[in-house]
Image (spheres, helix red, strand yellow):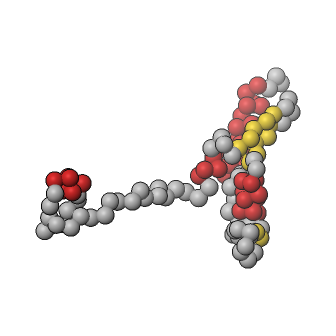
Amino acid sequence: MPQRLRMSCANRNSNGLNCKKPLMARRIRRAMFQKLRTSRYVKASGRYDAAVLEFSGKVRRIARVHQYGLKDRPNPNSHVVQYELRPLLGFNEDSKQLVENVILAMLMKNSFY
């Protein structure tokens, strides 16, 4: 076996003759919608009386379809698919109770009565 071929075949079988194919870069499995958390897809704005956090561009439509379980086409040439309800944003009952308790505690702490 020529020297340069032997050097490039670092991963050899037990007989030393056949080279293994190089490992392909594997896709890292991530939680669904993890990319949506990045600042690239989220737009924040605010005024004196409100704060708004929203998705931008095509991501807005995708997020809305999954948030409410609507029908959509995965690509332009496919059939319409009914998506499951997958809440991306919002409060559950525990979160609502926690926010309510924090607000009440702050009001009681800062009350002037």
Residue nearest the observer in this picture, 75 or 69: 75
Return the x and y of residue 29 as percentages of the image width and height: 49, 58
Report whether residue 93 is seen. Answer: no
Give the quadrant of residue 76: bottom right
At a point 70% along the width and 68% down the height, the residue shown is 74
In the image, residue 97 above or below residue 62: above
How many numbered tags mark residues here? Answer: 0
Quadrant containing the C terminus is: top right
Report whether residue 59 is seen. Answer: yes
Give the quadrant of residue 103: top right
In the image, residue 61 above or below residue 51: below
Return the x and y of residue 10 as percentages of the image width and height: 22, 55
Outermost residue on the top side: it is: 112
Give the quadrant of residue 62: bottom right
Residue nearest the observer in this picture, 24 or 90: 24
Return the x and y of residue 17 as percentages of the image width and height: 16, 66
At a point 76% along the width and 50% down the height, the residue shown is 57
Return the x and y of residue 90 as percentages of the image width and height: 72, 52
Quadrant containing the N terminus is: bottom left
